[in-house]
Image (tube, rainbow, N blue to C red):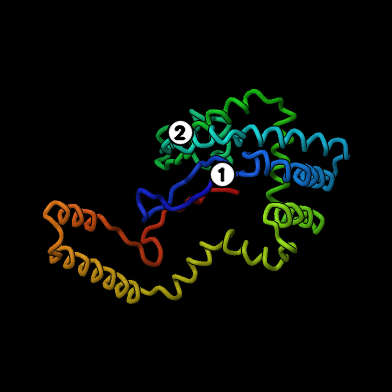
Amino acid sequence: MRVTSDIADATRNVLHAEHPELPAYFLEPSWAKVEKPYREYIARIFTLAGHADVVAEAAASVVIAFERASAGVEPSKRRLQEAVAPRRLPLSTANASYPLGLGLPLQGFGLDVHKGCNTTTVLVDVPRYFDFLEKKLRSMPVDDLKTIIEYKVLNFNALFLSTPFAKAHSNFYDMVIKNLKEPTSRAMICRGQVQTSIGELLDSYYLKEVWTADIAAHADSLVLKLKGAFKTGLDSAGWLDDTARANATTKLSKLAHLLGGPKNPKTYPTLTF
């Protein structure tokens, strides 16, 4: 899941629940190249976490089987998934429809999923995937689920753990997937994580210092003047017929803009990570 701008309303963000983007698993020629180093990477981080070699190798098989199945190997199925329109669901409905695939993660983040307690919605980009995931999770042995969860935790944090973890992560993702000549330095990783992890927090401090009321008002006036110029251009364009002019004017009237930061941002004080 991730939070990004809402394509239906550019002035607000929306919570997305997405199909995992794992292109190397869809096409067999790519998978043939990736399988061996990926299996070695999974086994390596499990070994570094204190597991015996035989356990780590078994874990790699469990993780790969789950990810290939959940990603959808056949390209035809992938195209079918992308053709389905996203569904905007209240959190309570998402929890009821997908209690394991979405409900547990939402609750884990501290969001209230009880009916009538939260007006927040989640945009389910590929409903078919979550239908599949729910059935898959219900049918899996508990030990396999524990293995997959442990892998997700190790893989997500590998860059920020000890040097052997970071090296194993870089050897696979940088050298194999990204085909880089040398691994990304720790300094570059940390620099990127500042924006990824606390970028919005730093942005809020910057706006408080730089984006004064006078500057905001001046910027808004410039945008309004630009919209006015567009309107004048539409009114005076001789090559537009009345229908086209009316449609364009209607679209222009619906144009929304956001400069600086949100006026009244919605916060989630109980959200945990």
Q: Secondary structure at mark 2?
A: helix
Earlier-in-chain disc, 2 versus 1: 2
- Check disc 2 and report the residue beneath it: 92
Q: Position of residue 67 (x, y in %)?
A: 66, 36
Do the residues bearing badges 2 and 1 touch, measured as CB atoms within 8 Å? no
Name the residue rendered at 48%, 66% in the picture.
204
Q: Secondary structure at mark 1?
A: loop
Looking at the picture, which amino acid does disc 1 mark? Answer: Phe
Residue sitting at the far top: 139
How many numbered marks does the figure carry? 2
Position of the N terminus by quadrant: top right
- In the rendered view, would you say 172 is above or below 72? below
For label 2, the crowd category at 10 Å Cα-Cα, with few meaning under 14, some 14 to 19 and many 20 or more, is many
For label 1, the crowd category at 10 Å Cα-Cα, with few meaning under 14, some 14 to 19 and many 20 or more, is few
Report, in whole angstroms, how far the alpha carbon at label 2 lies from the one at label 1. Answer: 14 Å
Name the residue rendered at 13%, 66% in the picture.
236
Examine the image and state in which quarter residue 229 appears.
bottom left
Looking at the picture, which amino acid does disc 2 mark? Answer: Ser
Q: Position of residue 78 (x, y in %)?
A: 54, 36
| Residue 72, label in figure | none
- In the rendered view, would you say 86 is above or below 156? above
Name the residue rendered at 49%, 28% in the picture.
97
Residue 89 seen in the figure: no
Q: Position of residue 173 (x, y in %)?
A: 70, 53
Q: Position of residue 120 (x, y in %)?
A: 42, 42
- In the rendered view, would you say 183 is above or below 16? below
Name the residue rendered at 14%, 51% in the picture.
243
Of residues 118 and 194, which is closer to you in this image?
194
Of residues 128 and 263, which is closer to you in this image?
128
Residue 243 seen in the figure: yes
Examine the image and state in which quarter residue 208 appears.
bottom left
- Check disc 1 and report the residue beneath it: 109
